[in-house]
Image: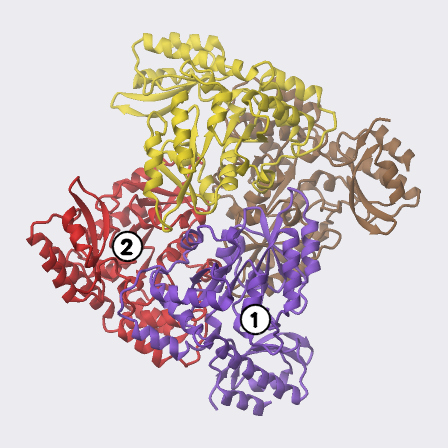
Chain colours: A yellow, B brown, C red, D purple
């Protein structure tokens, strides 16, 4: 049996539409550094989809870069970020935010999410010049645990941010998976109204690379490209990221690819549930976290790749299974047969 | 007549070999973050070409990123970089090195180059704890002006660096153009012996994106990937940069592409010289800097794209013409007809 | 009745010995930037007291500066600090450590202290290049809550640090109060053996200003003065800090002053305990945290200054009372009469 | 003959008025961190002297700290400082500005000064997002060479800054010497009108330590104390710097002390001129730069301390002689006898 990876959603390359246009446009001369036709077209498609013709759209190569760059661009030296303890910026970006000079104030995560009251408490805790000033709330959708923010949750977080003058920034590395989750009840244009700025992830949803940064708040737009250049985020052949997003936002491809990833994960989840396995967190998107006995894990590892997330008890562990736009349904079937 | 750009060497996409392999490998599952087969193969090919099996090879998306990242990784907070005034890091990286916390001590450029004596003078000027400690010499080959370091020049710079315990770092964004220049008298493996670390540029020599960072000095290797992650330089589908370099360093493609760019630029230069035009700096690689009368510039601008580099005198300006791996010889012929 | 402050231990100026020498030496010409006779003498006195003739001793103006400076000097960009949640650097330094580029990984505090097992857990949690590398354990003695590390506690923390190659740094802003606490069982020379580097606070123990930074670990000594200068910590008339420490470390003044502060706080604590009041944390040094009913607090506030630390329950709050080298015993008596 | 230093203006302690008040107020309990009565009084005295009741006044320990702090507080990440090549921040602050993340764009110095046209040229040179944005002009008065800005020079620099939206910041480490120079034609309140922010140096004019930072531009005032704390510049017993400036700005002491220093330097200069010695730069303040033959230098060095600034020719060098508020006229006479 061929080995198959459910390790992550960036094990494969890009959707064929993207590769096709890379090839068909390859020799057309274009401006560098994101001033090409494809970036322009992609930005317009994104603006239309999010429903804000005035949004600034920038394309960068990766998610850590987007987060570090936005922190540096949006915050004054003494301003901090409020984020759940499980946040990517807190754990999995090797201190990129601190390299850019900013503190992250963490709060306990609830299913990977932050609660409005935690924002208020954090703001009130900081009251004088011996302390940082919390200024930006950082959340991810989907969260690091694959959970999905409901419209009302986002709205209340947004309201709390406005109440205290904080920016709301959403890391959308897996925004496609969020918006096409069965749990989801909001559209991209609704989400757009809640956030001062956010990213729309391409890499984990069928692009070769690339995240789109959307900036709605006019106060955050000023000379953003200077910040990009300074952080090494302006790439010479920007056209290649433009082509990714032009295709992802043509004919709903972005949603189609995420829907497939979610469906495959849901099929895995249902099969596991049928066999009686429990989950560390209720499956909502393309990442699922079943609790499996150690012997089963050992057996599965021979044919399937996945991360052991954390120990659950003496006999079992939480594992992470991830599906992507390219996940082969036959591999899912094989996995379900093997459990 | 169709408009044609001699603006830069990143106006077109990638060499077809690269695109072909992107497509043929697209659905093969690979590890993320540069731990894929193509990065491994590419690194081995680079190690072989440079003649150092022990070199650490890392792939990043862009040149500013490479320079900022290496500065941060290699230097202590109070250590500075010595560079010519014309250096990319000094003028054209929006303060990336300073964002990473380091000072650049500039010296007058000689045809875009630094002289060994300037390094010595800079080191001796700094003598106590009120001053930075020059620790890394930064040069580019080709230089910002398209000139090429001779073997003996590099050797003397390298010796001066060793004398004072400085690292020598070469920005090789256009290293292909340097190594295939008619003026060149060194091989990549010889250059490799002079530098503690350097980059090999892909973006400006036929790749979609990517610079290879070569680290020879063991003291500079430690936990470099941590620095990469922190600066947003580890990209999830690292495979795509691996594929660029695997192809560039297969069957000498890297040299072939650069040779073409140089040849096209040489043809432009010869044609201009035949018509009696002078040059701001002697043409050596794929960037040339003729001095043209204003009326001719105005006429040419209707059909050709290029930068006006600087004013020369009341009646003429220096312009920059750049050829790339993809430059169409017919366009070169048309340009020469138009002058 | 005259108003009296138990707000902190920096409400008054300096011990008269210090002022006397400031005056008697005022017109003697001295080298600048810490190369004066008094800094030399003070450093020698400190070296003798700590029992390490090879220690590097530097004098800086304040505690936040010392902590920020040491973090920047000791750590590589991707290395982090492990500290209890209550740490001064985490809450009360306005993001100084992050400004210097480093992450703080916090652990739950136990009476303001860190436990060895928490260090181990934090180190093991961080295992790849997507995460920071914990490299320095930061503790304070006394802690932010006035508690005091026992010899065995420090020893085990030190052993754990050595096991994993971490530096142990002790913020000694109130080290005098720790070493003269009734709970204390170690000498300065014993503490010195456990720490790679630490500060000895002058400001909160009878100096006008100043913290001595002690560096034992040779790997951390290199060009520290360059780091000092870069962070604005080399002051021109360094003599004034030298004079503080020369006097504090002559005839045991450092201990005498701290002993007085502790005694006054103990007297307050005993008086409060006699009246039946409980404490938020057992009183050990010059800061005590009694739990007082709201009406009593309101009454006391008319004549005494102190911070309300935190709400305890509906009817009572935790207050912080701090005594200093200069605390007037009559004021203590008046306070006790008022409760 | 007793050895005497003309090395610098921080070889001695503080004016007796300052020491007297340190002693007389020593046991008066005061708020910490600059919220004490003396800082308040000092700030009011400064506001009155500069003629701006709305100015924000902050007191910090040293000049490098002031410059680094203001750069960080006033500038966005991609904004740079324009300064003469001889600037203290460029050469003698060990990269403090770059540590805070900002580039310094240097221009050739004219007698240590910057010319308005150089600002314009620097601004126009930077035109797109690949380059930093010059945003703050940094000058010193007196300059590093002891020269003094004329009213008209400052006015034109100020106008040029306004024309391009740049801030004008004046490093006033030796502002007293400038304002009491015979060359000077402006008052502190006039200078105040030209600068968005500046420092008034205490350390080099009779204080134990301390620089006052004056912020006139409302846009630069926001949460400055947060920046101070973050950079380690808020000191606990802020009272001691308050007392320095309260006394310096009472009964014109600031001017009296600087006048003395200038007079002593002028006496040295006149004596040297009478003997036929030339100067590297025309003597205007308390630092003078005579050109002396090597044999004379060797002879003088036995009894007097001074820096050899730079080699002048085979037989002579430029030396720097500095007088202070405390310079003994007898030592001046002795020096003049010795030449």
Give the chain letter at badge 2. Answer: C
Camera-nearest residue between C291 and B131: C291
Quick check: A209 left or right of C250?
right
Residue pictured at 36% horizontal, 76% vertical: D19
Q: Which residue carries the number 2 mark?
A: C194
Residue D10 in view of the camera: no
Quick check: B208 left or right of B238?
right
Image-quadrant location for residue A104: top left
Residue D210 drawn at (x, y percent): 43, 67
Number of callouts in the render? Answer: 2
In the picture, which quadrant includes the C terminus of chain B?
Answer: top right
Mark 2 packing: few (<14 Cα in 10 Å), some, or many (20+)? Answer: many
Disc 2 on helix, strand or loop? helix
Relative vertical location of residue D274 with respect to residue A33 in this rendering, above or below: below
Relative vertical location of residue D115 with respect to residue A318 in this rendering, above or below: below
Residue pictured at 41% horizontal, 81% vertical: C28
Relative vertical location of residue D305 with respect to residue B109 in this rendering, above or below: below
Residue C226 drawn at (x, y percent): 48, 60
Give the chain letter at badge 1. Answer: D
Residue A217 drawn at (x, y percent): 52, 34
Mark 1 packing: few (<14 Cα in 10 Å), some, or many (20+)? Answer: some
Mark 2 vs mark 1: tell me if same chain.
no
Disc 2 to disc 1: CB gap under 8 Å: no
Q: Which residue carries the number 1 mark?
A: D187
| The label number, if any, that marks residue A138 in the structure image | none
Single out the mark in the foreground, 2 or 1: 1
Q: Residue furthest right?
A: B275
Quick check: C310 left or right of B298?
left
In the picture, which quadrant includes the N terminus of chain B?
Answer: top right
């Amino acid at each position: 049996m061929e080995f198959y990876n459910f390790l992550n959603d960036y094990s494969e390359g890009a959707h064929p539409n993207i590769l096709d246009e890379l090839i068909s446009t390859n020799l057309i001369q274009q401006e560098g550094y994101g001033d090409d036709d494809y970036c322009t077209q992609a930005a317009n498609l994104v603006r239309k989809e999010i429903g804000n013709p005035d949004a600034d759209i920038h394309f960068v190569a990766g998610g850590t870069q987007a987060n570090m760059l936005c922190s540096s661009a949006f915050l004054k030296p003494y301003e901090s970020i409020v984020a759940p303890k499980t946040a990517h910026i807190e754990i999995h970006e090797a201190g990129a935010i601190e390299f850019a000079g900013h503190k992250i104030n963490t709060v306990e995560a609830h299913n990977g999410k932050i609660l409005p009251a935690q924002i208020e408490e954090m703001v009130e805790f900081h009251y004088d010049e011996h302390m940082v000033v919390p200024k930006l709330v950082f959340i991810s959708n989907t969260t690091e645990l694959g959970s999905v923010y409901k419209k009302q949750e986002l709205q209340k977080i947004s309201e709390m941010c406005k109440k205290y003058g904080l920016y709301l920034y959403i890391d959308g590395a897996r925004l496609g998976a969020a918006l096409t989750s069965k749990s989801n009840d909001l559209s991209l244009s609704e989400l757009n109204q809640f956030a001062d700025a956010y990213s729309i992830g391409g890499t984990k949803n069928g692009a070769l690379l690339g995240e789109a940064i959307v900036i709605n708040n006019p106060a955050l737009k000023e000379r953003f490209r200077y910040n990009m250049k300074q952080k090494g985020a302006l790439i010479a052949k920007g056209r290649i990221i433009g082509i990714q997003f032009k295709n992802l936002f043509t004919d709903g491809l972005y949603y189609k690819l995420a829907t497939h990833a979610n469906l495959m994960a849901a099929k895995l989840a249902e099969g596991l549930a049928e066999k009686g396995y429990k989950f560390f967190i209720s499956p909502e998107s393309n990442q699922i976290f079943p609790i499996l006995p150690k012997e089963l894990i050992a057996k599965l590892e021979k044919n399937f790749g996945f991360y052991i997330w954390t120990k659950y008890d003496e006999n079992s562990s939480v594992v992470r299974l991830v599906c992507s736009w390219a996940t082969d349904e036959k591999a899912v079937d094989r996995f379900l047969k093997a459990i």
